[in-house]
């Protein structure tokens, strides 16, 4: 599961993407590509007949090469569930809360993944870091449209987290790197 899908699922719990590949493909085609199978196929780098097979339910991304395609389809299906107006409304709600957003906490790093890397440290440790997200950071996550935009917000939250004391001060967002699969909402 991609970072975008996981975080949007936490921000919008009532708006879950469908589980079936044919339903996901139909939602993505209709809502993001205006119903055009050809435009969707071009964006995914596959033939239109492949998209038609996904829509008919006769085929789904299965092999190793299609794993990226399946992840993109899942993320796009999650993206198609939430309208820009709904995301903006949720962002304003989060901003109004101010400093603490209790229903959204994020864990970065995992022993099963590449974990979290901090630039300038002598050794790289796999460590889970639980972040308390502020209202402005949650609003920025709500407005983010890509994994990269979400990654920037989370890196900023990591910098805020580690700048808590004089011993650890001076971190900026670019000092952190993590694998998308290492980010999980709590």
Image (cartoon, helix red, strand yellow):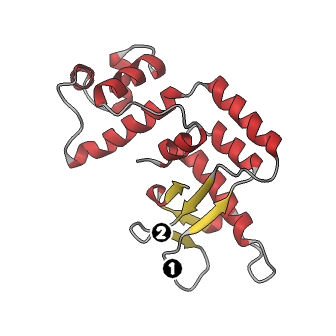
What element does badge 1 sit on? loop
The answer to whether residue 100 is above or below residue 112 is above
Residue 165 location (% of width, % of height): 79, 78
> Which residue is at a point 47% across and 60% down the rendered structure image?
182
In-image side of 148 versus 91 (left or right): left
Label disc, if present, on residue 124 of the rendered structure: 1
The number of numbered badges drawn on the structure is: 2
The residue that disc 2 covers is 115
Residue 40 location (% of width, % of height): 37, 23
Q: In this rendered view, identify the residue nearer to me: 17 or 51.
A: 17
Label disc, if present, on residue 170 of the rendered structure: none
The answer to whether residue 128 is above or below residue 141 is below
- The image quarter in which residue 72 lies: top left
Q: Are marks 2 and 1 in contact (CB under 8 Å)?
A: yes
> Which residue is at a point 40% across and 13% down the rendered structure image?
35
Of pointers 2 and 1, the one earlier in the residue sequence: 2
Q: In this rendered view, identify the residue nearer to me: 60 or 135.
A: 135
The quadrant of the image that shows the C terminus is: bottom right
Q: Distance between the Cα atoms at labels 2 and 1?
A: 9 Å
Specify few, some or many for label 2: CA neighbours under 10 Å numbering under 14, 14-19, or 20 or more: many
Residue 70 location (% of width, % of height): 32, 39
> Which residue is at a point 27% across and 30% down the rendered structure image?
46
What element does badge 2 sit on? loop
In-image side of 1 versus 52 (left or right): right
């Amino acid at each position: 599961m991609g970072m975008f899908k996981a975080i949007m699922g936490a921000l919008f719990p009532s708006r879950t993407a469908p589980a079936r590949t044919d339903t996901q493909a139909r939602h993505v085609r209709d809502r993001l590509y205006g119903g055009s199978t050809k435009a969707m196929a071009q964006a995914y780098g596959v033939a239109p007949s492949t998209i038609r097979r996904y829509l008919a339910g006769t085929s789904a991304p299965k092999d190793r090469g299609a794993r990226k395609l399946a992840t993109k389809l899942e993320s796009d299906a999650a993206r198609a569930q939430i309208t820009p107006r709904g995301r903006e409304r949720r962002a304003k709600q989060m901003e109004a809360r101010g400093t603490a957003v209790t229903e959204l906490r994020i864990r970065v790093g995992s022993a099963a993944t590449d974990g979290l890397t901090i630039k300038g440290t002598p050794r790289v440790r796999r460590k889970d870091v639980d972040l308390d997200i502020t209202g402005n950071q949650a609003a920025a996550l709500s407005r983010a449209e890509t994994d990269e935009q979400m990654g920037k917000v989370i890196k900023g939250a990591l910098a805020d987290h580690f700048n808590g004391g004089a011993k650890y001060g001076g971190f900026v967002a670019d000092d952190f790197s993590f694998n998308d699969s290492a980010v999980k909402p709590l």
